[in-house]
Amino acid sequence: MSGIRKQGDISKAPTPQNTPSSVANSYLKQQPPSVSTISEEDENNLSKQLANNPALLLMIQGKLGSLVGQQSGYIEGLPAVVKKRVMGLKAVQLQQMKLEAEFQRDLLELEKKYFKKYEPLYERRKDIINGVQEPTADEVEVGESLEEKEEDEEEEEEEEDAEDDTKGIPNFWLTALENLTTVSETITERDSEVLLHLKDIRMEYLETPGFELIFEFDQNSFFSNQVLTKTYHYQAELGYSGDFVYDHADGCEINWKSKENNVTINIERRKQRNKNTKQTRTIEKLTPTESFFNFFDPPKPPKAEELDEEEEEDEEQEADLEARLELDYQLGEEIKDRLIPRAVDWFTGDAVDYGFPEDLEDGEEDEDEFDSEADSDEEEEEGIDETGPKENPPECKQQ
């Protein structure tokens, strides 16, 4: 499932130029150019004419631009009998694509089958991390056999462990997340304090194509949820390449215990004097800020009926939304396919050296997402509104 592509990739592919070079060359040999040679003087005169007539230049550039990606006409010019053969090939390819779709669906069912076998192991991992159980002597021996350690180092560690009453593996998930570059770029210092309470990260497949990420927390002073979820949905129909196509994601509501503990907002407080009464008061301005926990409030792709209305929308805003959707999809896939199956290797840092594909670059797409306007110092008492935190998505499923 790691090959799933985001919606819209295929539609942006350029139209192929399907004129064989051998055909083009043979035609050119039969039809030599009949245009007379242009002298240097004529070329200079033409350049001056274009420079003095920008409208003509733009018209020529527009015409050339419209030719990019256009069919060459080679297929349309083929004999009827050859066209029928091409249509026959399309029918053969359609059979192959049906088999590809069957393969992808069978592959998904196979993933689900083996995921059920993984679940007891993930539960065992969770118990060891949180100090509910201890690894057996055999498990420790197997783990140590995977590492190259000198005997004196092992003995020294055993002596230290005998005197240590640390429970479980502290900061396991925070450390693992921070070693996964794409995810770590979204984690702030304030987020780290919250993620220290993370007990487990797991996933479940949906009945329909898609999956749900589940983040389980200890009781903490930040929010009352014990479970936060993020659900990724795929389209029912497979894409052109035969893979499942990403459709949208749903987050969950985070029930923050107070404004001060909400790491997704900044609180700006300042004193203000009323110019009529001369009384002072403290006002608050709440502004959304970058945070890992914005992951649970994903960007929404525009609906089909909204696309026509937004045709004239600023291209910069459209590119920003596209980048945020891409990052959100990438984060979900990496947590599902890379972090959860190899959590201990991300905790130790071993996975960093395993040669995974490079993480996404340009993590600054959210930097200018929220530009707040400064309040006037002479603002009167009447008409001052307190800006509340951003609206949360639908309530989280509690498990």
Image (cartoon, grey):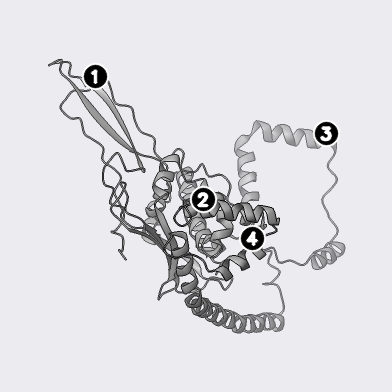
Residue 189, percent from left and from top: 44, 40
Residue 42, percent from left and from top: 80, 36
| Camera-nearest label, 4 or 1 | 1
Q: Quadrant of the C terminus?
A: bottom left
Residue 41: mark: 3
Residue type at mark 1 is: Glu
Q: Within 10 Å of the Cα at label 4, are there few (<14), some (14-19), or many (20+) other Cα atoms? A: few
User: What residue does disc 1 label?
Assistant: 378
Residue type at mark 3 is: Glu
User: Could you tell which of marks 3 and 2 lies nearer the N-terminus?
Assistant: 3
User: Could you tell which of marks 4 and 2 lies nearer the N-terminus?
Assistant: 4
How far apart are the two marked residues, 2 and 1, measured between alpha carbons? 47 Å
User: What residue does disc 4 label?
Assistant: 70
21 on left or right of 291: right
Which residue occupies the foreground of this view, 8 or 143? 143
The secondary element bearing badge 4 is classed as loop
Classify 263 as above or below 247.
Answer: above
329 on left or right of 354: left
